[in-house]
Image (spheres, rainbow, N blue to C red):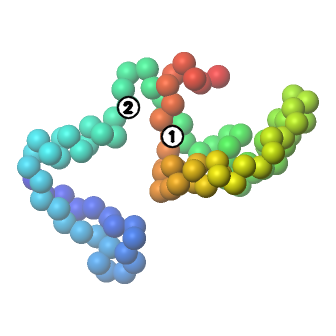
Amino acid sequence: MTFRWKDYRVSGPGRWKTMRLHPHEFIRRFLLHVLPKGFHCIRHYGLFASTNRAASIATARALLNVVPPAADPQQDRMLRRMHRGCCRAHVPAVARA
């Protein structure tokens, strides 16, 4: 099976690339993007949208009378590393509120 894909690390005419895979491997890779039953795909919107994240969280903390946690640079680095290049987060349905 042959298909084209876009390499976001490259700019210019070499951005689109062609890949050949065995059909079983293509289906395996495709199904990695399908969520298991009971999970819900959450995109970056709402309270945690990047454009108003700090203001939204501050408002929520004020309404709930919660003191902001002390900054932990170690945890911040870990979270940034975990979500580097992440376009969405997969969260179990039971975690949705």
Give coordinates of residue 4: x percent, y percent: 23, 62
Q: Secondary structure at mark 1?
A: strand
Observer-nearest residue: 69 or 8?
Answer: 69
Which residue corresponds to the image point at 91% horizontal and 30% vertical from the top-left?
Answer: 65
Q: CA distance from mark 2 to mark 1?
A: 11 Å
Disc 1 residue crowd, few under 14, some 14–19, many 20+, Cα 10 Å: few
What kind of residue is marked 2?
Answer: Leu
Which residue corresponds to the image point at 61% horizontal and 55% vertical from the top-left?
Answer: 77
Give coordinates of residue 94: x percent, y percent: 54, 18
**Vertical order, 37 against 43 (above or below):** above
Labels 2 and 1: the sequence-earlier one: 2
Q: On residue 89, which mark appears? A: 1
What kind of residue is marked 1?
Answer: Ala
Q: Which residue is mark 2?
A: 35
Give coordinates of residue 31: x percent, y percent: 27, 37
Disc 2 residue crowd, few under 14, some 14–19, many 20+, Cα 10 Å: few
Give coordinates of residue 5: x percent, y percent: 27, 61
The answer to whether residue 92 is left or right of residue 28 is right
Q: Quadrant of the C terminus?
A: top right
Residue 32 visible in the snapshot: yes
The answer to whether residue 47 is left or right of residue 64 is left
